[in-house]
Image: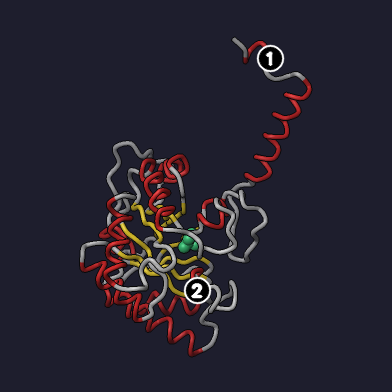
Amino acid sequence: MSTGNGDAVRVTLRDFQERKERREKLVVVTAYDSLFGKLVDESGVDAVLVGDSVGNLLAGYDTTLPVTLDQMVYHARATRAGVKRALLIVDMPFLTYQVSPQRALLNCGRVMAEGGADAVKLEGASDSVLAAVRAVTGAGIPVMGHLGFTPQSVNTLGGTRVQARDDIGARKIVEDAKKLEAAGAFSIVLELVPAKVAANVTKAVRIPTIGIGAGAQCSGQVLVLHDLLGLNDGFNPKFLKRYASMAAEVRDAVSRFAEDVRDGNYPDDDHSF
Ligand code: KIV
């Protein structure tokens, strides 16, 4: 489906909530710049997430921990330039929201005012994160939560692994989701969670859940654009379905260009002045 993104009606938080009530799936895809933001927006997704996965994908970091607030503001502003219709959600980086509710509010305010975000995403449901969610939503900034595997806690979670596999974990994630909802979150990402547990979370809260590696019963799904396009072909988690093989296409196109240059076939008369 191509909707174009020129003068389209903007997706709002109310649309998110109504979709859950009508059992219509929500679609979220990441983007980090204006060109891909525009292409993703034109594809008709409901939300574009400027994820701190930008650190892994564009900066080449091993984790999301080194990503800074300045980097997120830069990528948010660039993506905002291309996204006209979908809700633009921006990840708050490590330690920009846990230290104090005041710091969280100021930092989220920067992402909204300078980055042009419509909403921010915070990981976890510790007391400090819940206090941040209350402060930030209290100031009129919409917050998406993120439970299950939370990449900024990769070191305490013992690596990238499925969470909430046992009864205690399964009960805790439901409780955490309820706490996030009570604190004011409008939606929650569930990452690397057994499908049955994600279904229970989705039933336990009124707000929509957005799954990634969390089965089919979530209110919607999110994928990282570079993964779904097959640009990041060294990354092969079980949950990932690729819809293109762009890494191979990039290598092929660039090597054909190199061959043409080396053989003296480019530029030819058609491409010269
Ligand atoms: O940073 C990111 O891209 C994310 C998604 C995986 C949900 O948080």
Residue identified by numbered label 1: 268
Q: What residue type is labelled 2?
A: Ser
Density class for disc 2 (Cα within 10 Å; few <14, some 14-19, many ≥20) is some
Q: Which residue is drawn at 62% across and 66% down?
A: 238
Q: What amino acid type is highlighted by mark number 1?
A: Asp
> Residue 118, percent across and down?
30, 54
Image quarter of the N terminus? top left
> Is 169 in front, or is 68?
68
207 or 253: nearer the eye? Answer: 253
Which residue is labeled 2 in the image?
A: 153
Residue at the spot 56% in from the left edge and 57% down from the top edge: 56
**Residue 184 appears in which quarter of the rendering?**
bottom left
Residue 141 point in image, percent of width and height: 26, 61
Crowding near pointer 1: few (<14 within 10 Å), some, many (20+)?
A: few
Left or right of 10? Residue 92 is right
Q: Nearer the viewer, mark 2 or mark 1?
A: 2
Q: In this view, does 137 lie to the left or right of 153?
A: left
When asked about the image quadrant of residue 171, the answer is bottom left
Residue 197 visible to an observer of this rendering: yes
- Earlier in the chain: of badge 2 and badge 1, it is 2
Q: Which percent across, then down, holds residue 248?
A: 68, 44
- Measure how far apart labels 2 and 1 are at the Cα level: 54 Å
Q: In this view, does 108 lie above or below 8?
A: below
On the image, the x and y values in percent for residue 74 come to: 40, 48
